[in-house]
Amino acid sequence: MNDVASIREGACRCGQLRLKAHGAPLITMACHCEGCRKMTASAFSLSALYPQDAVEVSGLEPVIGGMHSELHHYFCPYCLSWVFTRAEMMGPFVNVRATMLDGADDLAPFIETCVAEKLSWVTTPAVHSFEVFPPMERFPELMAQYATSRQA
Ligand SMILES: [Zn+2]
Ligand SMILES: [Zn+2]
């Protein structure tokens, strides 16, 4: 799975919106913010960030959900699973919901964000915890650390 040439497949709950992610993610994250808790109907969201070119979407055409804001949350139009997010301000990346991908067991969150809003009983194995969402300038360094950790 650490092979950069590897392809990881994924799908929504009903399987009609499919994903193919090429190579390893740039970083994996858990987000504890209230918005993510609402949209996942769970304690936190899990994501795997990929370059936009590395992710192929096929099958049903995803629809925008969530806040319909500058963060574009894409859902399956049939089963309404939250499948991925794109944000113009983050650049040419796609943040795939890690649990949509096959073999998500090795996509444990490397960082966790918005822990100020975290439910008190939740813990994750994240190596770095941030009270809020960290500034974009931190990401190159965090991504480099994540890549190194995957090779270990
Ligand atoms: Zn679906
Ligand atoms: Zn969040």
Image (cartoon, rainbow, N blue to C red):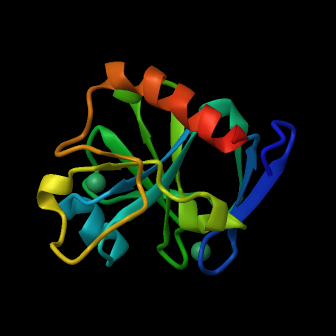
Query: Can residue 100 be seen at all in this image of the molecule?
Result: yes
- Ligand 1 picture quarter: bottom right
x and y, in percent, of residue 54 in the image: 71, 36
x and y, in percent, of residue 150 in the image: 66, 43
Left or right? Give the position of 7 relative to 147.
Answer: right
Q: Nearer the viewer, residue 74 or 21?
A: 21
Residue 89 drawn above or below residue 102: above
Which residue appears at 76% of the width and 40% of the height?
23
Which residue appears at 72% of the width and 39% of the height?
151
Residue 26 drawn above or below residue 34: above
x and y, in percent, of residue 109 in the image: 47, 55
Residue 139 sits in quarter:
top left
Query: Can residue 25 be seen at all in this image of the molecule?
Result: no
- Please tell me how many numbered marks the rendered image carries: 0
Residue 21 drawn above or below residue 121: above
Left or right? Give the position of 68 relative to 17.
Answer: left
**Quadrant where the image shows the C terminus:** top right
Which residue appears at 76% of the width and 60% of the height?
9
Residue 69 drawn above or below residue 91: below
Which residue appears at 62% of the width and 34% of the height?
147
x and y, in percent, of residue 32 in the image: 26, 60
Left or right? Give the position of 144 relative to 127.
Answer: right
Residue 40 sits in quarter:
bottom left
